[in-house]
Amino acid sequence: MFKTFRKALQIDEIRSKLVYTFLMLIVIRFGSQLPTPGVNPLYVQSFFANQTGDAFNFFNAFTGGSFEQMSIFALSISPYITSSIIIQLLAIAIPALEEMQKDGEDGKKKIATITRYVTVLLALIQSAAMAIGFGRSGLLVEYNFVNAAVVVLTLTAGSAFLMWCGERITEKGIGNGISIILLINILSRIPSDFVSLYEQF
């Protein structure tokens, strides 16, 4: 396996793709540490400390810990995944979308564009629900329209940026960008999960 990897690194094209993917993942992990403006980090920490169910912990692992820190990537790529599923299901019910899917490369580009728009819309809805729902409980340092709008715009922009990163990795890097982002998010949680297991048992 190492011999194959070493041979792959000797090819300029593969080496540049690996470097591009690696640099994009560094940017993604760096963004996962940047706090969302106007958010109270103590509220988020106490919220997770009081959670006994697995739903929020699963979503937090899915986002690579961004949700727990309420970073700019707190929504991760979940709006994009949801959007892709919705478009695929609608393609069965709506003949126009079905035609696009059968229309070759042009049809795929149109479907991808629609998926992007739906992703931004879903991210907007999810971030608004979080800013309003959790904001009233203490998520925001000061609950007002400006702070809520900043959080909504920041989380929506973060999700859209991750979608863009995934597409760029697919285009210029190695493998499927969205899957790689998911993988790196889940792998980034392994050290803290081991620490939690050690402390618990």
Image: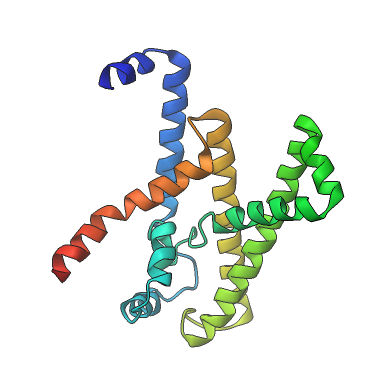
Extreme-front residue of the structure: 92
Q: Residue at x 67, y 57 (%)?
A: 120
Residue 21 seen: yes
- Position in image of residue 49 (x %, y %): 31, 78
Q: How many marks?
A: 0
Q: Residue at x 71, y 43 (%)?
A: 112
Q: Is residue 177 above or below residue 185?
A: above
Q: How is the image coloured?
A: rainbow
Q: Is 45 placed left or right of 144 in the picture? A: left
Looking at the rendering, in which quadrant would you find the N terminus?
A: top left
Q: Residue at x 43, y 41 (%)?
A: 25
| Closer-to-camera residue (24/1) | 1
Extreme-bottom residue of the structure: 137
Q: Is 104 placed left or right of 30 in the picture? A: right
Residue 201 lies in what quarter of the image? bottom left
- Position in image of residue 96 (x %, y %): 86, 48
Residue 82 lies in what quarter of the image? bottom right
| Closer-to-camera residue (147/181) | 181
| Closer-to-camera residue (172/79) | 79
Q: Residue at x 46, y 30 (%)?
A: 20
Q: Is 31 placed left or right of 161 in the picture? A: left
- Position in image of residue 167 (x %, y %): 59, 39
Residue 147 seen: no
- Position in image of residue 94 (x %, y %): 83, 53
